[in-house]
Image: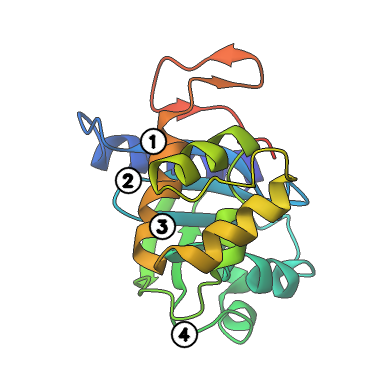
Amino acid sequence: MRDQDVRSAVLRWLDKIHAGDDNTRVVEEMGVWAGSVRVDIAVINGELCGFELKSARDTLERLPKQVSLYSEVFDRMTLVVAEKHIAKAVQIIPTWWGISAASGDANIGLRLEQARPACVNPELRPLQIARLLWRSEAIAILERHNLVRGCRSKSADVLAQRLASELALDELRLEVRSALKARVNWLGQVVTNKRDMTIQP
């Protein structure tokens, strides 16, 4: 079982459950923390949900750090993991993370079985959520809320701090999700469908 096999199975499942839903975007390799880490798959709609994939060929060495970083920005997280990793994985991930077991192989078809549903994240950090925005997106949001005065020439991080301190968490989450879904030029390419390119810092 390779990483690509697990990824393909998850993407097929997401495509199926979100078919015809114009309010949903599925993004592979979405960068967080200014692109220093990338979640394997993100789903952006009424929530920002992440899916981290660990195939039978992977190790869980990076998982503790990934847990720490992803838990600051995603409303829900799901670990999709080969069956052999489950016992160790449940000792690493928070109880609000979901977990799905991947079994089988590419020849006979992978099976995904939910072992635990993802719950709402109680650990969100507004500043890290605001840092998902491009600078131009942050300015546009500040303008809408009459908060842009004195900020236009500031760095992206200063803008993120202003947003995180001035907007209520739910309002900030909504603005960030709307900005991510509205992006039309990622990696210099025009986005034409719901499965897109990487979000760049």
Q: Residue at x 46, y 40 (%)?
A: 143
Give the quarter of the figure containing the C terminus.
Answer: top right
Mark 1 touches mark 2? (CB < 8 Å): yes
Label 1, label 2: how many angstroms apart (C-alpha)?
Answer: 7 Å
Amino acid type, mark 1: Arg
Q: Which residue is mark 1?
A: 25
Give the residue type that dot 4 points to: Thr
Q: Is residue 2 visible?
A: no
- In this view, the mark in front (2 or 4): 2
Label 3 environment density (alpha carbons within 10 Å; few <14, some 14–19, many ≥20): many
Q: Quadrant of residue 170?
A: bottom left
Q: Nearer the N terminus, badge 2 or badge 3?
A: 2
The amino acid type found where label 2 is placed reads Asn
Q: CA distance from mark 4 to mark 3?
A: 22 Å
Q: Which mark is residue 180?
A: none
Distance, label 2 to label 3, CA atoms, is 11 Å
Q: Quadrant of residue 4?
A: top right
Return the residue nearer the eye: 141 or 153: 153
**Which of the two discs, 1 and 2, labels the residue nearer the N terminus?**
1
Cβ atoms at labels 1 and 4 below 8 Å apart? no
Q: Which mark, residue 173?
A: 3
